[in-house]
Image (spheres, rainbow, N blue to C red):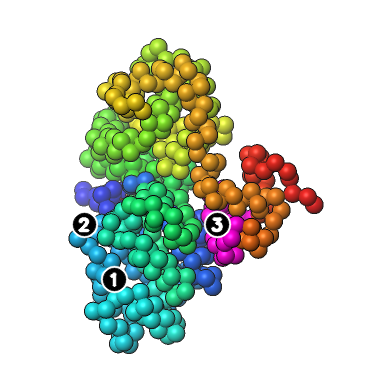
Amino acid sequence: MNHSNPFTYGNPITDAARFIGRARQIEQVFSRLRNVEFESSSLVGERRVGKTSLLYHLADAAVQRAHGLDPARYHFLYVDLALVDATTTPARLWQYLLGRLETSLPARAFEELDRTALDNFALAEFFDRLGAQGQYVVLLLDEFENVTRNANFGPDFFYGLRSLAIHHKLALLTSSRRELIELTHSDEIRSSPFFNIFANINVRLFSPDEARALIANALADDEIAFSASETDALLDYAGAHPYFMQVACHFLYAAYAQRHSDAAREMFWRGEFRKQAAPHLAEYWRHSDDKEKIVLAALALAETPRGAAQGEWDLSALRALLARSERVLAHLDKRGLVRRLQERYALFSAFWREWIVNALPEQTFELDTGGTIPFVQALQTALAQPELTESFAETELPAGLSPRELEVLQLVASGLSDAQVARKLVLSPRTVSTHLQSIYNKLGVNSRVAATRFALEHRLVKNPPKK
Ligand SMILES: Nc1ncnc2c1ncn2[C@@H]1O[C@H](COP(=O)(O)OP(=O)(O)O)[C@@H](O)[C@H]1O
Ligand SMILES: [Mg+2]
């Protein structure tokens, strides 16, 4: 019998029938494109969480149609910016983009374009001409940090792109591991208004429903079915994470196809899963800063049953440290490395916990003063001296707000209108509404009232607005 395995994990999902979930993010992206401003979005998520798959999905004509955009008029172009290297210049990138667009746009759009002189004027004229013909371009720029971090792409490039996006009917959908503003090669670019054309849309773990839908969808027409207890065990061990789920499911399916016994099946998928997953978890760990590592370690130890590697760790001290690490935990939640339960946070999978506990003895911790100490020693110190980690709660603004966004939120919460906020901060009303949109996204709200409530609850404003 020859089964082709319906679970795959190496390449992004390109077939819309195999794409699961993400309904909210998809609607957010399309609603921004549908509005008259034709607005750009920035997808932010860790490696392997499903950004490229999501971009492919958004580039699918049937998906666009289903969300109210006519593919004959809106041209989505997916671009893998991993191709950008130290020798790539903005002009070269534009040549490449235009060459790709030529295959899907009407030829007459290109007639007046002089490709040997691709400055921002030429590009503005090009997109204006397209707009006049009722044709719009959406560039899907995967791994955009390859551009923001590349010194060949200076402020001129970003100002030009911003102007095309605001005034010349070009929309951008970028993907990156962190918010773009954190991924720039110079302060000049960081402080430019380029980044406020985007709403940040976080791509995180699957919800429990999405996770189960992935399995049900893949096995819908299959004679192989996973048992309920196996499915639970798999979700616990791999987590509701698109990549890790696909890996675990792939090997559980393979074990069925090879007609292993129940016990052999479990040994097989867990063993193969660990081999595949470990390097990726090591990478998540490496990309975490010291505070994140301390909090991840505390979570892992607090979740480990007593008697196992848990050893001499004091559970109540671990919990106390976690209780004062709200900001760090919220950030880890955004990265998809922990998930929020009712009353607390948990690591996203049992294997992640296992991996951290096993890795701890070999880890080191960089001291501010230079030099390193064993990680375990740093954790012991953090547990013994609460004041050291007190600052965990304050170093970041709530919900990952930028200082500017905090300012806008405070003024809005104190009862000012957009126009008043704009005057007060000497910003354009458009910039204020961009900030507000980003604030709403970060707070997960969609009204001023809800944003104001957040500000009051987090004591960001002293006086509630007067009625
Ligand atoms: N929406 C999805 N539905 C089903 N599987 C997904 C989905 N998103 C991601 N995956 C799985 O996760 C893997 C990694 O996704 P990918 O899009 O390459 O992530 P990223 O671009 O964020 O690194 C894919 O190979 C696929 O197996
Ligand atoms: Mg990718």
User: Which of 51 and 168 lies nearest the eye of the viewer?
Assistant: 168
Label located before the other in sequence (2 or 1): 2
Q: What is the CA distance from the residue labelled 3 to the residue labelled 2?
A: 33 Å
The amino acid type, in three-letter code, at marker 3 is His
Residue tagged 2: 86
Residue 240 falls left or right of residue 371: right
Which type of secondary structure does the marked residue at label 2 adopt? loop
Q: Is mark 2 within 8 Å of ligand 2?
A: no
Residue 233 falls left or right of residue 253: right
Q: Residue at x 36, y 50 (%)?
A: 183
Label placed on residue 435: 3
The amino acid type, in three-letter code, at marker 2 is Ala
For the residue carrying disc 1, how many other residues have a C-alpha within 10 Å: few (<14), some (14-19), or many (20+)? some
User: Which of 151 and 290 lies nearest the eye of the viewer?
Assistant: 151
Segment tinted magenta in the rendering: 425-447
Which type of secondary structure does the marked residue at label 1 adopt? helix
Residue tagged 1: 94
